[in-house]
Each structure stands twice: as C-alpha cells, then as structure tokens.
Amino acid sequence: MIRHTADNAAYEAARAAMVPGASSGEATTLAQGILASQQIRDASIVIAPDPILESLAWPLAATKLATC
C-alpha cells in the first residue's frame, strides 16, 4: 500500500510540475498531501531540476522516499 501511495504521489507531483509556470514547491506540497492522506510523514521529496524552467521541460523527476 505504501509503495502504491509513493508511486502515485511521484506521478501526481511530476504532472503538476510540468505545467508551465509551476514551481517545485507546489509539486512538493501536492506530494506531501497525497502521502499524508495515508499517514506517511517525514518523507524525503526531491523535485529535479529545481528550479523548474520551461527550457528544461525534460527530464523532470519526482522521487519519493517514505518512512512510516
């Protein structure tokens, strides 16, 4: 269950981050909300590259590591 939640948080954060004008902070907040919905706290969330620039549309990665 935790792995699926982490995968989903990474997926949704990456989708949010690739919208023109999005920020890594917005993507991080979204991922934290998804993880918190399953009582996953203190997760290490890395959005790369940071800052997100339109000229760097790819590669964009959102990696989630969770502790319970």
Image: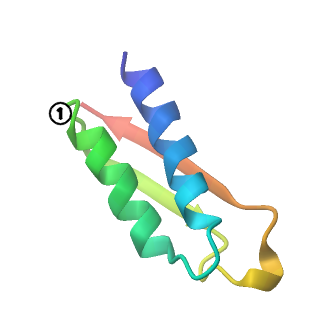
Q: What residue is at 46 percent from the left and 22 percent from the top?
A: 4
Q: What residue is at 41 percent from the left and 73 percent from the top?
A: 25
How many marks the image carries: the answer is 1
In this rendering, is residue 19 above or below 31?
below
Please tell me whether mark 1 sits on a helix, a strand or a loop: loop
Horizontal and vertical percent position of residue 46:
51, 60
Residue identifier under label 1: 39
In this rendering, is residue 2 above or below 16?
above
Horizontal and vertical percent position of residue 21:
58, 82
Q: Residue furthest top?
A: 1
Tell me if mark 1 has few (under 14), some (14-19) or many (20+) residues whose alpha carbon lies within 10 angstroms of its own: few
Image quadrant in which you'd find residue 11: top right
User: Front-most of 43 and 56?
Assistant: 56
Q: Amino acid at mark 1?
A: Gln
Q: What residue is at 54 percent from the left and 76 percent from the top?
A: 22
The chosen color scheme is: rainbow
Q: What residue is at 59 percent from the left and 54 percent from the top?
A: 14
Horizontal and vertical percent position of residue 43:
33, 47
In this rendering, is residue 62 above or below 11?
below
